[in-house]
Amino acid sequence: MKKRLLTILSCCIATCLYAQTFSFDGTDKTAIQIKPSDVYNTTIGYGYDLTRLAPVEAGKPFFFSVSVPDGNYRVTVTLGSKKCAGNTTVRAESRRLFVENLITKKGALRQVSFVVNKRNTMIGTNDRVRIKDREKTKLNWDDKLTIEINGDAPACSSIKIEPADDVTTLWLCGNSTVVDQDYEPWASWGQMIPRWFDDKIAVANYAESGETAASFIAANRLKKIMTLAKAGDYLFIEFGHNDQKQKTPGSGAYYNFATNLKQFIDEAKAKGVTPVFITPTQRRTFNTAGKITESHGDYPDAMRWVAQHEGVQVIELHDMTRTFFETLGVEGSKQSLVHYAANTFPGQFTALADNTHFNPYGAYEIAKMVLQGIKDLNMPFASHISTDFTGFDPAHPDDVNLFHWNNSPFFEALKPDGN
């Protein structure tokens, strides 16, 4: 197999004291050579990762990781090969989609740039984000940036990674309908939406399954964001699914939920960051007439009420997902959620039937709804949405049969926290 090469353009990456620029390139004769069997370790700070997939084979998916500090990084991939045709999908960290099914002819090369946000749990030197046990194996919360090269015929000739300080960051706050899901067949809109932005926008998804507005704050997720956010960034906030289940004194849509939403607003505005509310996605709860029943109580209205009083823009995902589900119908809507017969995936011995959590197709469609909401509200950064996004009408969703997703190699039958 052809060797891939790694060029370090700054001081030794293993030190990781500050953000550096580096690349690995199959044509750079001055580069450090990386053998297919070379896997990531903390001593050198780079290499092929997730050793169950090593050694790397030509035309097969692979992961490559580099140890870097927290921050935004512009990743430039040269896709294609002089020896064969390719069809390549690029994801990063916890299955965040950046490049989708890019076809290259034999001998043709295509260069694509995008921005990956990398983070660990540390907040300064004395505090940290209190992540859940299930998050401790997530690729999102570690000291390395991980690139996944996947696709029908993955072909990647080079990867360059450099610090990106000239970008606007969209910070995502939410629950399991927003989070970067690590395992097939689960997916959420927050990990799909990066695919639609150019390399002037970073998406930093801090959402986690089971979170409420209150628990998100208590776990120091908002604190971590506010230590890194800068004026001109945006804070997207979607809660409600789990908040409505709280029964403690003072709980309720117009009580502690509204108060917590106000804290997100106040902290964002104090940093010059623009808060944006996103009403919660619907659950697949049909009545006998084939219409979605409202299962979130007063929580969507409470978000709208706070937004009106505080001058915050709202993306109406609650309404768009209702239209989406009803358009697909009682049975068809299952194709957007984690509904799979037993043995669809290796090691899956029982059927999966989840009416809250999306599969990759559903998450992809929800991401398009958020993009349409951004455009409808004329947000300034909408000019950085990819030109191949031509708008989205939830009453006319994409044909599920035309959606093509290459599974990552990791599967989990366990339902994400929350409902």
Image (cartoon, rainbow, N blue to C red):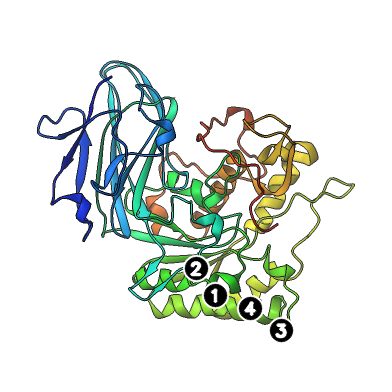
Instruction: Point out residue 93 in the picture as x, y percentages from the top left corner.
Output: 42, 47
Label 1 SS: helix
Q: Quadrant of the C terminus?
A: bottom right
Which residue is labeled 3 in the image? Answer: 250
- Residue 255 in the image: above or below residue 198: below
Which is in the foreground here, disc 2 or disc 1? 2
Image coordinates for residue 30, horizontal then vertical, percent: 9, 33
Q: Which residue is mark 1?
A: 218
Q: Are marks 2 and 3 in contact (CB under 8 Å)?
A: no
Q: CA distance from mark 1 to mark 3?
A: 16 Å
Q: Amino acid at mark 4?
A: Ala
At label 1, which amino acid type do we have?
Answer: Ala
Q: Mark 2 highlights which residue?
A: 130
| C-alpha separation, residue under disc 2 versus residue under disc 4 | 23 Å
Q: Residue at x 65, y 60 (%)?
A: 280
Mark 2 falls on what kind of element?
A: loop
- Residue type at mark 2 is Arg
Label 4 – label 1 distance at C-alpha = 16 Å
Residue neighbourhood size for the residue with mark 1, other residues' Cα within 10 Å, grouped as few (<14), some (14–19), many (≥20): few
Q: Is residue 24 left or right of residue 72?
A: left
Q: Considering only order in the chain, which callout, 3 or 2, is on the residue closer to the N terminus?
A: 2
Residue for point 75% across, 49% down: 284
Whether residue 33 appears in this view of the structure is: yes
Q: Badge 3: few (under 14), some or many (20 or more) residues near its Cα, within 10 Å?
A: few
Give the numbered dot on residue 258.
Answer: 4
Label 2 or label 4, whichever comes before in sequence order: 2
